[in-house]
Amino acid sequence: MSTPPRLALARDIHDGIAQDLVALGYELDLLLGKSESTVESRREIRTLRFRVDELISKVRREMYELRDPHALTLQEELSIAAHEICGDQLANYELDSFDIPVSIQGDLKSIAIELLRNAKFHSRASQIEFILRAIENRTYLEVRDNGVGGAKVDISRLGLVGIRERVQAHNGGFEITSSEKGTSIKVYL
């Protein structure tokens, strides 16, 4: 039986970066204990030690969240969000079950929610479709609506500008097709 990706990631974080941060904390403690340290250098080292402790706490919280058996998958979170945002306008949604790389999950969730909100509140659509699937080792997201169109990336549409920036940060693809018959926005990460 293979280890679920979330548990494997939690274990890798524990065995790697978490241990490295603890070791860094011990090294800072040793520096604080040196008698030749000046008051100013001790203050700076103590500040760094507090920052390392904060990072250790943050990493531990992330590990516990990854190990939580009741944690929702990104697809489950997006399904809930789509229904909450779109309500009766959600005519179709297809959220395939597949492993989404952790490195893109935060941005993918933000992008999906922005696109769903745009379709709900700006398009005047009566029907919204939401699709998430794996295509050729990439994550494909599409939001379509039958609204008035007009979606484009320009300075007056900061949400779409932000989406484009998030997509570019992952060397992904971003495509808008918009007319008076509706809009389709596709994202590949």
Image: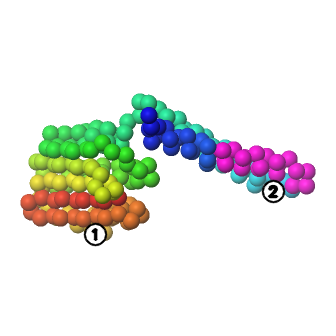
- Residue 179 is left or right of residue 83, and the answer is left
| Count of numbered badges drawn on the protein | 2
Residue toward you, 34 or 62 = 62
Disc 2 element: helix
Q: Earlier in the sequence, mark 2 or mark 1?
A: 2
Q: How is the image coloured?
A: rainbow
Q: Which residue is mark 2?
A: 41
Q: Which residues are magenta?
A: 18-37
Image quadrant where one finds the N terminus: top left
Q: Position of residue 168 (x, y in %)?
A: 38, 65
- Three-letter residue code for mark 1: Asp
- Percent x, y of residue 120: 20, 49
| Magenta-span inclusion, residue 36 | yes
Which quadrant would the C terminus be assigned to in this image? bottom left
Mark 2: amino acid: Ser
Is residue 166 at least partly visible in the picture? Answer: yes
**Residue 114 seen in the current view:** no
Using residue 119 as the reference point, say whether residue 38 is left or right of it: right
- Most extreme residue toward the right is 35
Q: Is residue 46 magenta?
A: no
